Image (tube, rainbow, N blue to C red):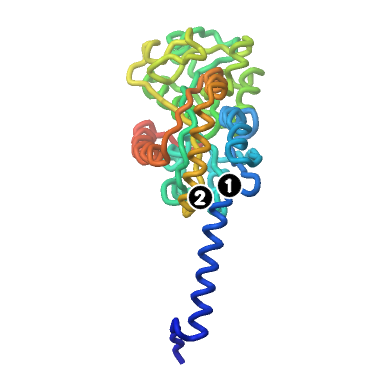
Amino acid sequence: MRLVFSLRSPLGTWAMLALSVLCTGTALAQTMYPDKPLRFVVPYPPGGGTDVIARIVQERFGAALGQAIIIDNKGGAGGSVGSELVARATPDGYTVLFTLSSHTINPAIYPKLSFDTIKDFEAIGTVASLPQILVANPQVPANTVAELVALAKAKPELLAYASVGNGSPGHLAGELFKLRTGTQMTHIPYRGGGPAVVDVISGQVPLLWVSIPAAAQFVKAGKLRALAVSTIKRSAAFPDVPTVQESGVSDFEVDSWYAMFVPARTPQPVIERLNRALNSVLADATIREKLLAQGAEGVGGTPQALARIVAAELPKWAKLAKDANIKAD
């Protein structure tokens, strides 16, 4: 028997009342958001560049929302492990992906990702942009990019470079460097910047492409030697370190960024609330100074601006991965 709900019948009245309560409850939950601590999922281990930037933002972001922010490091597979966790999380605004530009690189080298970079996430905003930096163990007999290229061509079996993982901006920079200089170096992926830095300092690996926040204090302490940065312009944090292009390598540029995403289907009012909080944090002069000290420049902006960056970079990195034969090691 088919049931027909009439607004004049008791059953129809109760159905409409239940729907009204459900809609009111959802709206109320969004109005009260957030009413408990948020989790920033950082898809890399503690001590790396993403972790450093997340912790700079953490306290002030929590103050802007009136809730604590918990950092949850979930490293692995070039950031894909943490990204998958967020993609599968409840879309309520309490689980936030705090990641870097490997988010748009991974689809090019991991053909079987369990999530879709565009469809499974909603953009919140770009936190900061910065270069990758090429650093060496001080025992490496090369003080410049030119000397490094000469060494790599003379003794190709000697050199290897580390990165924070397959699909990271450092991995991309390292492979592009090989392509543009005609050199060969073995790529050694790590599960984050912290472990990679430790092994380069100890001499386990001679070279490292990494974001400046992960290496800055060790370069300043003389434990690592900075050879070049990956962007067109020099870094404000290390103005004496030349760019790769300045050093004689043409057509070389790798920008990296940090950004925030939430699971797809997160309510729009929640996305807007998170975006306002991010922009208020980045408007703080103290936060911007802390970011600059790490070689990063605060960005901010709208969710739509970040979504456009993601859409533009996916085909760009896919082409580079194909041209340079970049694969997950």
Circle number at residue 181: none
Instruction: Measure the C-alpha gap from mark 1 to mark 2.
Output: 8 Å
Q: Quadrant of residue 327?
A: top left
Task: Write the residue at 46% across / 15% down.
Answer: 235
The front one of 106 and 32 is 32
Question: Who's the residue at 38% across and 18% down the image?
Answer: 232
How crowded pointer 1 is (Cα within 10 Å; few <14, some 14-19, many 20+) is rated as many
Residue furthest bottom as drawn = 1
Taking 63 as reference, is 239 left or right? left
Q: How many marks?
A: 2
Say what secondary structure mark 2 lies in.
strand
The picture places residue 236, in percent across and down from the top left corner, at 48, 14
Answer with the quarter of the image where residue 289 lies: top right
**Residue at figure coordinates x 44%, y 37% from the top left:** 105
Residue situated in front as seen by the camera: 2 or 5: 5
Image coordinates of residue 279 in percent, x first then y, are 49, 33
Work out whether residue 237 or residue 58 is closer to the camera in this orientation and state it. Answer: 58
Residue 24 in sight here: yes
- Label 2: few (<14), some or many (≥20) within 10 Å? many
Evaluate whether residue 161 shows in this view.
no
Compared with 31, 168 (above or below) is: above
Verify CB contact (< 8 Å) between mark 1 and mark 2. yes
The percent position of residue 122, horizontal first and vertical second, equals 45, 47
Task: Name the residue tied to disc 1.
Answer: 95
Q: Residue 263: give its label.
A: 2
Give the answer, above or below, for where 223 lies relative to 179: above
Side of 288 where 308 appears, left or right: left
Label 1 or label 2, whichever comes before in sequence order: 1
